[in-house]
Image (spheres, rainbow, N blue to C red):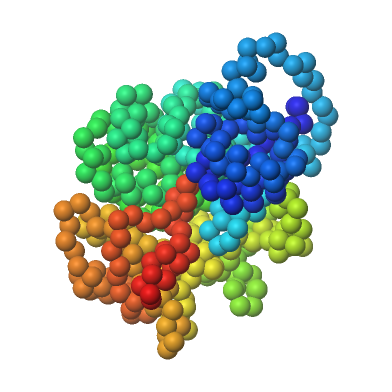
Amino acid sequence: MLGVLYLSHSIVCDAGELLHAMNISKPRIVFCSTDCVETLEKVMGQLPFLQSVVVLGATTSPRHIPFHSLVQHEPANFSSVDVDPGQHVAAILCSSGTTGLPKGVMLTATNVITCMEGLMSPVFGDLNASQTHLGVLPLFHSYGYLAQLASLSIGFTTILMPRFNEDLFLRSIQTYKIRLLFIAPTLMVFLAKHPKVDLYDLRSVQEIWCGSAPLSPEVHKQVEKRLNIANIRQGYGMTETTMGVVNTPRGAVKYGSAGRLAPGTSAKVLDLKSGKTLGPNQKGELCFRSPLNMRGYCGNLKATLETVDDEGFVHSGDIGYYDEDCYFYIVDRVKELIKYKGHQVPPAEVESVLLKNPAIRDAAVVGLPDDLAGELPLAFVVRQPGSYISEEDIVKYVAEHISPHKRLHGGVRFIDAIPKTASGKILRRHLKTTFLTKSKL
């Protein structure tokens, strides 16, 4: 072990986001592609700790080191160092930032090693060197980063995509006979509903792992039927728990469930008001204690203490429950629940109803502020190509499939695309600030 700390960030970030991330981890060396050199140049003057920039590609700046020049020379005389794997920070990854500025999540060597062992276990992982995987997830996200590490550790082949493109994604599966997909629900919806899917031969796909957001039973079943694949497995985790603390056992799928606790993991579900521990089929905040739990947030002790309790449980901020068989179900984010006349409306539940409609390609639900009700459930909808479904049709459709307080009392807005993070999480804050603010002007 070299004792080197790895950290990553998105190539599509703006200068302010990059500066924020850099000031968390304070790297001395940055490796970057030519795509993000310009953004990096804008903030380099504010990064006194940065000593070297290595560019993967052609560079004309004397301040930058071309990557090819490193590999052309004799390798440095690296020597291993002794570290405590439980304390040594192997990586700092940014949290998703869906509810605020990203925080730097410190993952230890033990976290990473435990994750790799879990991915190879015959019950929860069973990954092996014979598989071919399509690398479509962003490598700066914990899901994509650890999937790539698994490829290196276990030895399965990975075909990397530079960025997502619908035709390239489908053509790559067809050309390289992809057997394994690590994807988010966004791509599951694409596989379930997009007409282009029928133009390609996807019969090689034998297994799909889906994470980063709840997957509705309807979309799960649609992909199963369309691709004729039985092995679709959900998982649940967060950057703060390295990867998955809940995974679906092989051959034991329950539709709508993220699976069972990973080995060595314990959980509790807390009532949102009293903090009391709840039993089966009672919804509350999910909390996990595991060898996968982060060491803490880099340089942010206050946030660490707010997230990890005295018993060592990470408080996820997600609403969920477990059933009599100890299968876990994710309902929604605590901070994203819509408060309508004293009722709590989970946006993901309403979205799952909307996505059942064949005329709807994608959807997101947010709370529209209202003086009398508090918030009104409002849907942003992307129509399927050639669809002319109206707001009235959608409001009526939802009303036929859901409880009265969860109906679309705030109406429907049609947009071209649902804004999401690179890992597929809906950016509800962006929808509110961009579209609802504009509508008031």
- Where is residue 166 drawn, in percent x and y? 32, 39
Q: Specify whether 262 is left or right of 213.
A: right
Residue at 37% from the left image edge and 56% from the top image edge: 418
- Where is residue 301 drawn, in percent x and y? 77, 58
Residue at 64% from the left image edge and 51% from the top image edge: 20
Determine the residue located farthest toward the right in the rendered image: 82
Question: Which quarter of the figure is the N terminus placed in?
Answer: top right
199 versus 310 height, above or below: above
- Where is residue 272 drawn, in percent x and y? 59, 74
Q: Nearer the viewer, residue 169 or 236?
A: 169
383 versus 395 height, above or below: above
**In this orientation, does residue 173 appear?**
yes
Residue at 79% from the left image edge and 42% from the top image edge: 87
Question: Which quarter of the figure is the C terminus placed in?
Answer: bottom left
Residue at 43% from the left image edge and 32% from the top image edge: 161
334 versus 191 height, above or below: below
Q: Nearer the viewer, residue 180 or 103?
A: 103
403 versus 319 height, above or below: below
Determine the residue located farthest toward the bottom in the rendered image: 372
- Where is residue 47 drawn, in percent x and y? 71, 43
Q: Specify whether 395 is left or right of 35.
A: left
Q: Nearer the viewer, residue 266 or 78?
A: 78
Q: Specify whether 55 is left or right of 197.
A: right
